[in-house]
């Protein structure tokens, strides 16, 4: 992962989550991973093209997803209905778009794809041998992982 | 001796008689032996002990030996010999003459072991040997003093070497080795123990823990040398605990030349002489370089400057990776004092002055190097090829299998004829597709077909 790419993603994730969800977010140590471990239960995915290609995965438990959706909508949401899903995909969109904007201002051009949401138990995602940056966050007493993989073209 | 009377004149007869007498006496001497030795085999070699020191020869079962906890590795235990307790010592282990043991770890408990019980003043010991041979009579003059070249057993514990029927027998000085009275015993025990594998392993474990590193086949040789230097320097005779500072100091001797600083002469010239010669044959328009574990970036910039000066018209494409985010962040946008920059570097071409004494790498140079947050364990995720790869001192961050895998993967990313440089003190075993380039100062390998 190119050094210049790291901070925009970390910063925008923190900024967006702070303003939309909660102020109390703890950031863990950034690590690298090349194999994908089982997902927590809810995955948001946004593709990236441009200077480099790749994707961003935002991984959390289904409970945390519902909590975030509830906070963002200012009402209690108990199921993954249309509203919950579109709220969460919008969150992913905001995070990645903010990062892309930051990167653009430092001279790297990126486009992002519309986000998608995956919900299920025992989710596994595999992408062929790509090293990804893991930004582990903790909010609302739950874990949330941002997984960024970019490959220079 | 025959006397040829025809050829002799009488004047010489007396002298001949004298000679004859002398030679007769000599003959008589041959028959008179001075002492006898009991000969036995340890490993593949033959040894002897003065029979006067031997009390008896016995065969025992392995089961008869009672093991004693917390003893040195060559003390096998104690044996009840007709009511008397004697210690049993395995001579092969003690003198490091073990034959390579097969992987079969099952110990035959009923195995018959030949032992020689020796008596020294007030001490009885049982020595386990490989095979007891026979009693051999010897004269003192048959024994030649031990050669200092006898590496396995310390010179002072050997009475000498005798040749019998074209076989060499090393004769032990049992008093010197086992006697309680002299200090020799302590010395031999400790000397054996100091260099024993157990002590070395203990030393390695401490180094690994304190420096959070891995010691593996690639770097073990150097670590062993550092260990020997350490104990020789400190005159250490027992298991010691290392502290943080010492462990750090020891490891500082492991790192390659110019670790954490700009490269300087003569290392730069060694690099130029070997590496540039190779690269010249394979690179024309661009030179693709990968630096794995670039740390603070000094190594990356040093190599960049050398290549840029040499391949003036080519594009240098350099990727520098490290898994430590904070050091690599400092590497991009490196700042340093003037005294840190050696004279071979064109300071005006590559640096800009930002303060009185502070220099910074020019931005256009910096942007040519692709600094990357990357863990070398995931090296297979690179889908690029390179002409030159530097991975100095990386082995200490990997376990054996991880490093093997790393070399395997990194080899794939090297073009044919490309060069990989590993740490000065590292040594690769057999690896597919790489052939060593002989050089005294750098450890480097060239990618070959296969």
Image (cartoon, grey):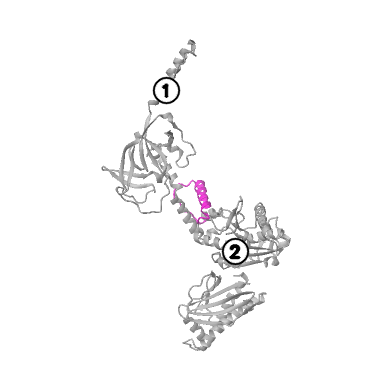
A131 left or right of B110? right
> Residue B338 bears which disc, if any?
none
B362 left or right of B252? right
Residue A74, visible in the rendered structure: no
Residue nearest the observer in this picture, A60 or B49 = B49
For the residues bearing labels 2 and 1, Cβ distance under 8 angstroms = no
Quadrant containing the N terminus of chain B in the rendered view: top left
| SS assignment at label 2 | loop
Residue A89 position within the rendered picture, expressed as x and y whole percent measured from the top left: 55, 83
Residue B106 position within the rendered picture, expressed as x and y whole percent measured from the top left: 35, 54
Q: Is residue B317 magenta?
A: no
Write down the residue under mark 2. Answer: B413
Residue at horizontal 43 percent and vertical 30 percent from the top? B142
> In the figure, B394 relative to B196: above or below?
below
Mark 2, Cα crowd under 10 Å, few <14 / some 14-19 / many 20+, is: many
> In the figure, B314 relative to A4: above or below?
above
In the image, farthest residue toward the front: B6
Mark 1, Cα crowd under 10 Å, few <14 / some 14-19 / many 20+, is: few
Which numbered disc, 2 or 1, marks the residue that appears first in the sequence? 1
B348 left or right of B294? right
Write down the residue under mark 1. Answer: B26
Where are the magenta residues, as a range? B216-245
């Amino acid at each position: 992962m190119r050094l210049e790419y790291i901070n925009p993603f970390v910063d925008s994730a923190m900024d967006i989550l702070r303003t939309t969800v909660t102020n109390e977010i703890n950031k863990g140590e950034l690590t690298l991973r090349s194999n994908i471990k089982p997902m927590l239960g809810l995955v948001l995915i946004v593709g990236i093209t441009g200077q480099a290609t790749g994707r961003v995965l935002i991984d959390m438990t289904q409970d945390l997803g519902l909590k975030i959706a509830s906070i963002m909508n200012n009402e209690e949401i108990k199921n993954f209905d249309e509203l919950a899903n579109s709220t969460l995909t919008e969150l992913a969109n905001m995070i990645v778009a903010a990062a892309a904007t930051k990167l653009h201002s430092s001279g790297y051009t990126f486009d992002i794809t519309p986000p998608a949401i995956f919900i299920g138990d025992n989710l596994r995602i595999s992408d062929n041998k790509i090293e990804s940056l893991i930004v582990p966050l903790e909010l609302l007493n739950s874990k949330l992982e941002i997984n960024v993989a970019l490959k220079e073209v | 001796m025959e006397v040829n009377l025809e050829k002799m004149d009488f004047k010489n007869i007396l002298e001949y008689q004298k000679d004859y007498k002398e030679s007769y006496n000599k003959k008589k001497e041959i028959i008179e032996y001075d002492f006898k030795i009991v000969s036995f085999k340890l490993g593949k070699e033959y040894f002897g002990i003065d029979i006067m020191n031997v009390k008896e020869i016995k065969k025992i079962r392995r089961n008869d030996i009672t093991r004693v906890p917390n003893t040195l590795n060559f003390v096998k235990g104690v044996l009840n010999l007709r009511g008397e307790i004697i210690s049993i010592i395995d001579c092969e282990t003690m003198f490091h003459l073990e034959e390579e043991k097969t992987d079969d770890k099952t110990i035959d408990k009923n195995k018959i072991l030949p032992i020689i019980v020796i008596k020294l003043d007030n001490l009885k010991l049982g020595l386990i040997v490989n095979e007891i041979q026979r009693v051999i009579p010897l004269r003192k003059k048959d024994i030649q003093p031990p050669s200092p070249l006898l590496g396995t057993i310390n010179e002072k514990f050997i009475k000498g070497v005798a040749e019998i029927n074209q076989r060499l027998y090393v004769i032990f000085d049992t008093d010197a080795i086992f006697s309680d009275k002299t200090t020799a015993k302590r010395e031999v025990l400790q000397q054996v123990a100091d260099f024993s594998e157990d002590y070395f392993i203990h030393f390695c474990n401490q180094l690994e823990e304190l420096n959070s590193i891995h010691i593996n086949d690639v770097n073990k040789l150097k670590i062993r040398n550092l260990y020997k230097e350490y104990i020789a320097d400190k005159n250490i005779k027992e298991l010691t605990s290392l502290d943080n500072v010492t462990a750090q100091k020891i490891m500082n001797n492991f790192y390659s030349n110019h670790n954490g600083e700009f490269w300087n002469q003569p290392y730069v010239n060694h690099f130029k002489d070997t590496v540039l010669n190779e690269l010249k044959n394979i690179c024309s328009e661009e030179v693709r370089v990968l630096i794995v574990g670039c740390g603070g970036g000094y190594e990356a910039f040093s190599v960049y400057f050398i290549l840029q000066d040499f391949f003036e018209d080519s594009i240098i494409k350099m990727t520098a990776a490290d898994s430590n985010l904070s050091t690599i962040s400092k590497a991009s946008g490196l700042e340093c004092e003037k005294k840190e920059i050696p004279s071979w570097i064109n300071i005006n071409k590559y640096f800009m002055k930002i303060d009185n004494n502070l220099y910074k790498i020019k931005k256009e140079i910096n942007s040519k190097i692709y600094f990357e947050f990357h863990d070398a364990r995931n090296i297979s995720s690179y889908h690029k090829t390179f002409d030159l790869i530097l991975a100095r001192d990386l082995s200490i961050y990997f376990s054996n299998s991880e490093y093997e895998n790393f070399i395997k993967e990194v080899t794939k990313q090297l073009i044919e004829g490309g060069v990989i440089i590993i740490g000065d003190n590292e040594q690769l075993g057999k690896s597919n597709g790489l052939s060593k380039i002989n050089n005294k100062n750098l450890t480097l390998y060239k990618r070959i077909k296969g």
